[in-house]
Image: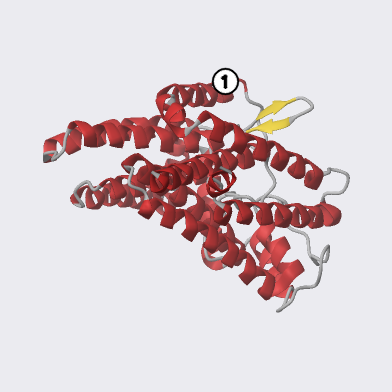
């Protein structure tokens, strides 16, 4: 009986999370000691990790079947929170992304909206596949319209905050999950064409008529597009200082608490620059290798799963995690635009960390299901 219980814990997923918790604590401590004195972000991150591991246990006790039955109510609650945020949320740095809870900190509903969207889409795709074995083009089109409506609502509410980085995550999650679902490839060409057309239309107005762009999309959105385009020329205070900090680390790094230059948001958006300056090229490769190992283990679990809904869930989780990893690390080098997306499991943030730990709990549940089937 003891051996059976041990097999139900997938250590190849749990151990990397524990290592990432240690990396997160010391990197945030480094950023805090240099730039954010007397804020105790590292201590609070450690507390969030303790709570997060409790969340994992709670999710594993609750089981995925129970969670999936609540996918639509969870989606509704997340939509309501996004609406309430726009109505009552404080304006911080010209955005409305967080509720401020006294003595606790900030709460970001969009972090949980990402998880809710994955659960809801997995439910929709599973129900569609179970009802219609070989759908016609019209039936797929109607299904995609429903998916589009489910994705549009949180995307529109998130745009009003505004938070374009999270909207990109919504879109990527949707594309990957639909791709895994096996719908006709023509729909992806249509979708990419629509997205490309919208971007070309927007950028045409942006470059040719600034006043018209501001009148249509607003000043806030204009400034965010302007910020996104800064990365192309490798300009901007954040980017320049981030690249200097990374370059200063050399092969082995300058050591703990040895980031030589200031840049905004070192404990969140630019946490990788702090890590690279402290632990150098070698440490950075090891960290990226650890993230890749975790991603691969989750992908392998999804590929081996015999349950379609598990494949859809894992495809959404992997799409979310990998995009955020590529985006966050890439923007510190100037390879990707600066969008304010944090590095999963490393950057400071209670809402984001708890949402990721919910994901880990669901993934461990999937692993449990697969191992139980092998025992039968």
Residue drawn at x 55%, y 40% is: 361
Question: Eyeballing the image, is 108 above or below 83?
Answer: below
Toward the viewer: 115 or 150?
115
Residue drawn at x 22%, y 46% is: 183
Toward the viewer: 11 or 227?
11
Q: Inspect this view and state whether residue 330 appears.
A: yes
Q: Quadrant of residue 333?
A: bottom right
Question: Eyeballing the image, is 270 above or below 94?
Answer: below
Quadrant into which the N terminus falls: top right
Q: Residue furthest right?
A: 38
Q: Which residue is mark 1?
A: 87
Toward the viewer: 221 or 33?
33
Q: Report how many numbered discs are placed on residues in the image.
A: 1
Q: Position of residue 282 (x, y in %)?
A: 67, 75
Residue drawn at x 31%, y 43% is: 308
Quadrant into which the C terminus falls: top left
């Amino acid at each position: 009986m003891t051996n059976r219980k041990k097999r139900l814990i997938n250590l190849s997923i749990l151990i990397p999370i524990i290592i990432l918790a240690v990396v997160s604590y010391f990197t945030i401590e480094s950023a805090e000691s240099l730039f954010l004195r007397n804020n105790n972000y590292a201590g609070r991150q450690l507390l969030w990790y303790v709570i997060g591991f409790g969340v994992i246990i709670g999710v594993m006790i609750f089981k995925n079947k129970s969670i999936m039955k609540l996918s639509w109510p969870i989606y509704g609650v997340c939509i309501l929170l996004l609406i309430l945020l726009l109505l009552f949320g404080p304006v911080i740095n010209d955005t409305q992304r967080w509720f401020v809870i006294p003595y606790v900190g900030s709460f970001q509903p969009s972090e949980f909206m990402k998880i809710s969207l994955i659960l809801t889409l997995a439910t929709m795709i599973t129900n569609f596949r179970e009802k219609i074995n070989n759908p016609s083009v019209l039936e797929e089109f109607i299904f995609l319209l429903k998916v589009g409506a489910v994705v549009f609502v949180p995307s529109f509410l998130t745009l009003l905050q505004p938070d374009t980085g999270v909207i990109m995550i919504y879109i990527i999650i949707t594309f990957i999950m639909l791709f895994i679902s096996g719908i006709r490839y023509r729909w992806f060409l249509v979708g990419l064409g629509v997205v490309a057309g919208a971007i070309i239309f927007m950028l045409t107005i942006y470059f040719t008529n600034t006043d018209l762009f501001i009148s249509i999309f607003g000043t806030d959105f204009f400034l965010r597009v302007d910020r996104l385009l800064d990365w192309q020329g490798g300009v901007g205070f954040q980017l320049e200082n981030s690249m200097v900090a990374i370059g200063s680390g050399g092969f082995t790094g300058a050591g703990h608490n040895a980031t030589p230059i200031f840049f905004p948001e070192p404990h969140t958006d630019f946490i990788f620059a702090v890590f690279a300056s402290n632990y150098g090229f070698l440490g950075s490769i090891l960290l990226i290798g650890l993230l890749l190992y975790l991603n691969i283990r989750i992908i392998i679990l999804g590929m081996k799963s015999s349950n379609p809904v598990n494949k859809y869930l894992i495809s959404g989780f992997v799409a979310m995690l990998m995009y955020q990893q590529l985006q966050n690390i890439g923007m510190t080098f100037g390879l990707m635009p600066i969008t304010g997306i944090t590095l999963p499991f490393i950057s400071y943030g209670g809402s984001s960390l708890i949402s990721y730990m919910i994901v880990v709990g669901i993934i461990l549940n999937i692993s449990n299901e697969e191992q139980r089937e092998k025992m039968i």
